[in-house]
Image (cartoon, grey):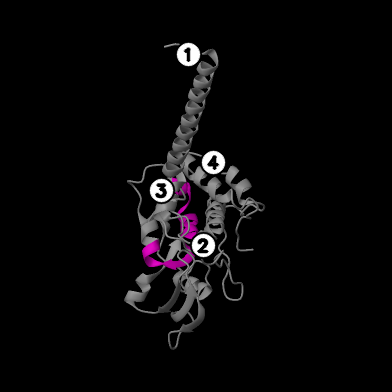
Amino acid sequence: MTVSWSAYRRARRRSGQAWAVLAVAAVSVLAALFWFFTDGQFAAAEPAASGPTEAPVFDPAWMKPVVPVHPVPGGTAIAALDGLAVKGRAAKDNYNREAFGQAWKDVDRNGCDTRNDILRRDLAGVLFVEGSKCRVAAGSFQEPYTGQFVDFQRGSESSRAVQIDHVVALGDAWQKGAQGLTAAQRQGLANDPLNLIAADGPANQQKSAGDAATWLPKNKSIRCHYVARQISVKAAYGLWVTEAEKDAMERVLGSCPEQRTVSAN
């Protein structure tokens, strides 16, 4: 059987086109796999959620500022992130919550403990326990990490349902520079309103000591503020980030490059 030169060229052309299609398909599959094993696995596992775009920081009417180790840098969060040191985690086997002082101590000396300060700051329609100007008995808010509307009533069950989250978890801080702080500075970090947000209890438990590389709020509307706040806290207390954490922060801030740092001023 003989084949003409023109037929041979057409067959070669069709073969080349087929290989090109296969090459494009292979690249697409590799790109999809890369996305899944970086951002995609988190996105696929998360239901869509929306809610507040930021959380309160400071109310000068009744709160007093906690002085950090360094002033929070002004400007964009991405610029502040570039100013943070990038290192690996230090050991955690010697971590103890007591290294950050008494839980919910009245560090700003306004007469109210930190937990009640944050509840009063973050909840709307606050009611106090009879005879007290500090102890929050009830209130409501749109919880920032899930976007759900929550009614708070003081009690053992409701106290677990609404917890005070350390934006930079104390366990994470311990592994990224807090071991080098003084006891008073660590106590300030644990009670600084900049580092505290009233949050959904289960979400806070899920976060545990996670950083931005392992946990982000389901409410995607607040992620830029949340990451900027983590960066601001780390800058204010001389803490560092890991390479994976910095990469995760940069991905979030890529959607909001003009996001500013967060401070109590």
Closer to the camera in the image, 251 or 71: 251
How far across and down, in percent of the image, does residue 224 sit? 56, 56
The residue depicted at 47 percent of the width and 73 percent of the height is 119
71 is within the stretch colored magenta:
no
> What residue did someone put label 1 on?
3
Disc 3: CA contacts within 10 A as few (<14), some (14-19) or many (>=20): few
Secondary element type, mark 3: helix
Q: What stretch is highlighted in magenta?
A: 176-203
Q: Assess whether residue 198 is covered by the magenta stretch.
A: yes
Question: Could one spot residue 83 in this view of the protein?
Answer: no
Helix, strand or loop for the magenta stretch, by majority: helix
Q: Name the residue under label 4.
A: 85
Residue at the front extreme of this rendering: 1
Residue 175's x, y, as percent?
42, 46
Q: Against 149, is 17 above or below?
A: above
**Mark closer to the observer (2, 4):** 4
- SS for tag 1? loop
Q: How far apart are marks 2 and 4 (CA)?
A: 22 Å
Q: Is mark 4 on a helix, strand or loop?
A: loop
- Of the numbered discs 2 and 1, the one sitting upstream in the chain is 1
The amino acid type of the residue labelled 2 equals Asp
Report helix, strand or loop for mark 2. Answer: loop
* Residue with the mark numbered 2: 192
Q: Mark 3 points at which residue?
A: 41
Q: Distance between the residues labelled 3 and 1?
A: 52 Å
